[in-house]
Image (tube, rainbow, N blue to C red):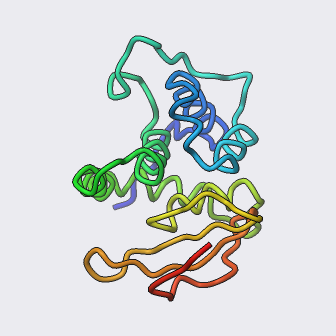
Amino acid sequence: MEYLELDSPSLDNICAEVYSILCSLGKDYMSVIEPSIVDSIMALCNKKDEPNIGQNKELNEQCLSEEANAIIERINLHYWCRSNSEKEKLINTIQNNKKSHDKVISLLTGSNLKKHENILMSLFKYDSIKIFQDGLAVVGQRDVGDKYLYGCIDKNGEEIIPCKYNLFYN
């Protein structure tokens, strides 16, 4: 049986929610995120319909869409997690929220992905994303256990070198 989901938020509204959360967290959090990710979120968000984010509320108390939470979880995984145990907990949370992550991927996937959608897709496609240097970023995908295979993407989110190398240096 198929279910029709009503009132699923649009990509621009989801990005507006994410951008509002990033702004409320402040520049200490935003400064460690790859700038092209933040730029893409800003470019895709519907600024005239910004959600009301409470400055004094915890993230889990905000009335965010599941999709906005999925993007925040991915940003957290790639840029804010400081320990392997913290990453493992977050990976378990992501696996439990797979439906929300799949919704975002579905919104981002299309016959002609534009630059900003492609860059946001990299949050979901790769398990590790380094900061861009000279127009390229090293990305990694989890292989077996705690091992990663590395490759490279460009500023448009296009994979330049596939993730098949055990080591990769900038």
Q: Position of residue 63 (x, y in %)?
A: 42, 24
Taking depth in this image into account, of 88 and 4 the one nearest to the observer is: 88
Which residue reaches farthest front? 169
Q: Is residue 57 left or right of residue 48?
A: left
Q: Is residue 99 left or right of residue 134?
A: left
The quarter of the picture where residue 131 lies is bottom right
In the rendered view of the protein, which quadrant contains the N terminus? bottom left
Residue drawn at 57 percent across, 79 percent down: 151
In the rendered view of the protein, which quadrant contains the C terminus? bottom right
Counting the numbered discs, the total is: 0
- Relative to 153, say whether 107 is above or below: above
- Relative to 158, say whether 97 is above or below: above
Q: Position of residue 83 (x, y in %)?
A: 29, 52
Residue drawn at 49 percent across, 39 percent down: 68
Q: Position of residue 74 (x, y in %)?
A: 45, 51
Taking depth in this image into account, of 50 and 126 the one nearest to the observer is: 126
- Relative to 104, say whether 20 is above or below: above
The quarter of the picture where residue 96 lies is bottom left
The quarter of the picture where residue 15 lies is top right
- Relative to 125, say whether 165 is above or below: below
Q: Is residue 117 left or right of residue 55?
A: right
